[in-house]
Image: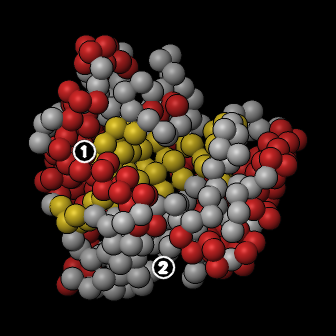
Amino acid sequence: MNTRRKFIQCIASLAFAGFSGFIPFKLLSAKDMTALFDAKDTYGSNYEPSYLKLHRTGELKNRGMQLWEMMNRCTLCPRECERQRLRGVKGKCNATDKLQIASFNPHFGEEKELSGTRGSGTIFFSNCSLKCVFCINWEISQGGYGTVRTIDELSEMMLHLQKIGCHNINVVTPTHYIAHIILALDKAAGRGLKLPLVYNSSGWEKIEVLKLLEGVVDIYLPDFKYSNAEMANKYSPGASNYPEVTKAALLEMHRQVGVAKPAKDGLIYRGLMIRHLVMPNNVSGTKEVLEWIANNLPKDTYVNIMSQYQPVYKAVNYPEINRRITRAEYDNAIQWAKEYGMTNIEIQGWRHL
Ligand code: SF4
């Protein structure tokens, strides 16, 4: 068993220990315990996530059911493989109708406006529709790691993350399980969930699905991975339409939630936060990605320009991406963002180089 898999299993077991009620007292300091989640203290008495309104009218459950029906001959993601998931058939993403979850826990390594002091309440879903050859979470996304869970259990996880003080519910790689997630959210909302929902995805999303998430998602956290169709197809096989699909998705996400701006407490509760991973040899087309964002979204759109690319999983088979990026490659990215007039970019350090 390699170190990375051990780490994931350790996190997962801690998380499931937490599910039975032990983890809050192990992970939170005494100071944190006094600051356990209280919506009035944290956000001001007026804050409530957008999905609560839909929950009260019954529309949230309706949306979940509409998404559920899309799994019949599944068209939830742009692969539109039409596998009969509701009959137990696996999609190209490897998911059936059974919900599979790898871990759930407070995460302190997300953007600081999401992690805050008590962590972002991440729930890592197994399997993935995009299948990048360099995926850092490949054991979870493509290796089958995770445990089958019910929708009720997922709603309990959300409530647990709220109870231990997390600032938001952060669903990681949610696309293929979005029906399960919305139905769980509806149940949790009925039992007092009031954290913002973070939709943490590859960016490769269908407009038809995003429309059903309007008024449900508070924070969109998509990647913008490639600007070039050939690169997309090479490193995420079969996803040659990634650039055009993702551009349309980003515009729709922005239309729904607008620009992400921190509140007085430094946390973000609503808006679009884009991630772009700078890759070796300009594989991700960073200049074009940044140029498109600057020309098509407000200049103060939040963009995290990420430097942490590592050559893992199948990257060894592709010499051009079988290394980390250089300082010059990252500096170029920052320079381009500045030249395009972008005013809200997250610049990362170089401790790892
Ligand atoms: S989510 Fe999975 S099953 Fe559905 S269309 Fe995409 S790859 Fe196919």
Quadrant (top left, top right, bottom left, bottom right) of the N terminus? bottom left
**Which residue corresponds to mark 1?**
14
Picture quadrant where residue 262 is located: top right
User: In this rendering, is residue 8 above or below 147?
Assistant: above
Taking the spot 34% from the left edge, 38% from the top edge, the residue there is 106
Question: Percent x, y for residue 68?
Answer: 26, 69
Q: Are marks 2 and 1 in contact (CB under 8 Å)?
A: no
* Label 2 C-beta lies within 8 Å of the nearest ligand 1 atom: yes
Q: Secondary structure at mark 1?
A: helix
**Which residue corresponds to mark 2?**
79
Label 2 or label 1, whichever comes before in sequence order: 1
Question: Percent x, y for residue 237?
Answer: 58, 80
Q: Amino acid at mark 1?
A: Leu
Of marks 2 and 1, the one in the foreground:
1
- Report crowding for label 2: few under 14, some 14 to 19, many 20 or more residues within 10 A (C-alpha): some
Q: Is residue 256 left or right of residue 166?
A: right
Q: Is residue 248 left or right of residue 186?
A: right
**Of residues 15 and 342, the one drawn nearer to the viewer in this rendering:** 15
The answer to whether residue 60 is seen in the rendering is: no
- Give the CA distance from mark 2 to mark 1: 34 Å
Q: Is residue 289 left or right of residue 147?
A: right
Question: Which circle marks residue 47 in the picture?
Answer: none
Q: Amino acid at mark 2?
A: Arg
Picture quadrant where residue 159 is located: top left
Taking the spot 37% from the left edge, 85% from the top edge, the residue there is 82
Question: Percent x, y for residue 128?
Answer: 42, 69
Q: Secondary structure at mark 2?
A: loop
Question: Percent x, y for residue 196?
Answer: 37, 36
Colour theme: secondary structure
